[in-house]
Image (cartoon, rainbow, N blue to C red):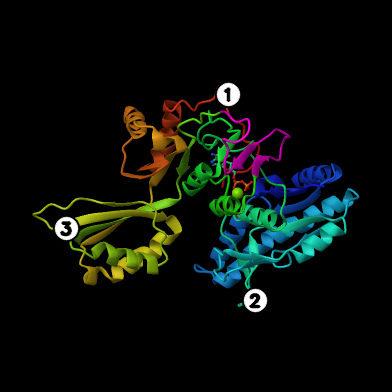
Amino acid sequence: MALIVQKFGGSSVADAESIKRVAKRIVETRKAGNEVVVAVSAMGDTTDELLDLAHEVTPIPAPRELDMLLSSGERISMALLAMAISSMGYVARSFTGSQAGMITDAQHGAARIVDVTPVRLREALDDGAIVIVAGFQGFNRDTRDITTLGRGGSDTTAVALAAALDADVCEIYTDVDGIFTSDPRVVPKAKKIDRISSEEMLELAASGAKVLYIRAVEYARRHGVTLHVRSSFNNNEGTLVLNNPGEGDAPMEQPIVAGVATDLSEAKITVVGVPDLPGKAAEIFTIVAKAGGNVDMIVQNVSTAVSGVTDISFTLPKPEAQQVLRALAAEQERVGFSAIQHDDQIGKLALVGAGMRTNTGVSAKLFEALSAASINIEMISTSEIRISVVTRADTLAKAANVVHAAFGLDGDDEAVVHGGTGR
Ligand code: ADP
Ligand code: ASP
Ligand code: MG
């Protein structure tokens, strides 16, 4: 008997009809003789709506209470799903994150899983039940409070359950047929990938491809969990995320570029007129870190000998910008820079591929494609298997489409998006 973990995202359980459809799919897996553990997200855009509601009540909701509020979204869908399965004559039992033994640190809104003790889940499975777990949430032993794992965190719940229960596979059901060479909502000619390395998927997820949450990919990579990303709207094979996709019957030669990711969630801050002295960058980024800024790209301009000052630009998640701007402004005199600029109309494009390690000319081709489309590049950063550029937000979609085509990734047909609002 195999143990299968299945995760259903918000768009797959958006309404009562969808919940019944998903219930049927779970029952089919059980009927085929498998033990089934399900991690479920909140219905549709519930999490966003709860967040909006909190911000209508207060501009800065207390983190503990916000986690109480947000974790309720997944409790609604888990109970409805268990009811739907019961009505089909199968035994299903739902569990909150804390009942399921998801132990996390105390970081509200971005908690990390530190231990998984699925005692009650194992008991329920031994009783022959289908187990449904509320995704995205856990429990901290010291504070004895409910935590949430960060947006998109139900993916991590599923992977952590798969690792703790030693599952045969972790299936991530969503509103597209798998992982594509780019977001099909942005690049209609994106192609489905059959198998991708966890290394490449990590870079794509870190660069904004929200089809999988980065922490889930990390967790799966570390614990050797095989991920199968597929559609909850049909029975097609999806995409396998493997640590070594070259094994078995896969083609020997992998393409140079795996995909193109886009990200509109970051803002750019420029610190203008920074004295060009040792220690100034350290001072600035210490202030940024203390204010809770998670810095992504950094560019420092060369200073001219005459001026003796330089500009430092960096990107970070939009919601963190205000607190970082305030913290920098408070220290302006001490650090000695002349001004701060804030730009929230940027877009980030990342080209990812393990083949970049051994192939030259990839950046030249990328820059050429952007230049041919008259798209200006504002920042550049690279890793061994990724090149990222910052453009204006309103040119990002065009940039992604031309780069996708330039690297020969375009498919013949338009990719299908089955549901969801893309919010
Ligand atoms: P769920 O609610 O199932 O967790 P998400 O909205 O978090 O679904 O993730 C699925 C979405 O991810 C897709 O609808 C698609 O718009 C987006 N996406 C971004 N990049 C990619 C990619 N490379 N391949 C497939 N989907 C992608
Ligand atoms: N419901 C949460 C969110 O919208 C977690 C998830 O769906 O993975 O972020
Ligand atoms: Mg998701």
Separation of marks 3 and 2 at Cα, in angstroms: 50 Å
Disc on the earlier residue, 3 or 2: 2
Q: In the rendered structure, does residue 240 fall within the stretch colored magenta?
A: yes
Disc on the earlier residue, 1 or 2: 2
Where residue 400 sits, quadrant-wise, is top left
The answer to whether residue 160 is left or right of residue 319 is right
Judged from this view, the residue extending furthest toward the left is: 306
Q: Residue 167: where, in percent of width, then height?
A: 72, 51
10 Å crowding of disc 3: few (<14), some (14-19), many (20+): some
The answer to whether residue 327 is above or below residue 11 is: below
Q: Residue 239: where, in percent of width, then height?
A: 62, 37
* Residue contact between numbered discs 1 and 3, judged by CB atoms under 8 Å: no
Tally the numbered discs: 3
Of marks 1 and 2, the one in the foreground: 2
| SS for callout 1 | loop
| SS for callout 3 | strand
Query: What residue is rendered at 59% in x and 55% in y?
Result: 48
Give residue 309's mark: 3
Query: What residue span does the magenta drawing correspond to?
Result: 227-251
Badge 2 amino acid: Arg
Look at the image and tell me whether residue 375 can be seen: yes
Residue under label 2, please give it.
Answer: 144
Residue under label 1, please give it.
Answer: 413
Separation of marks 1 and 2 at Cα, in angstroms: 51 Å
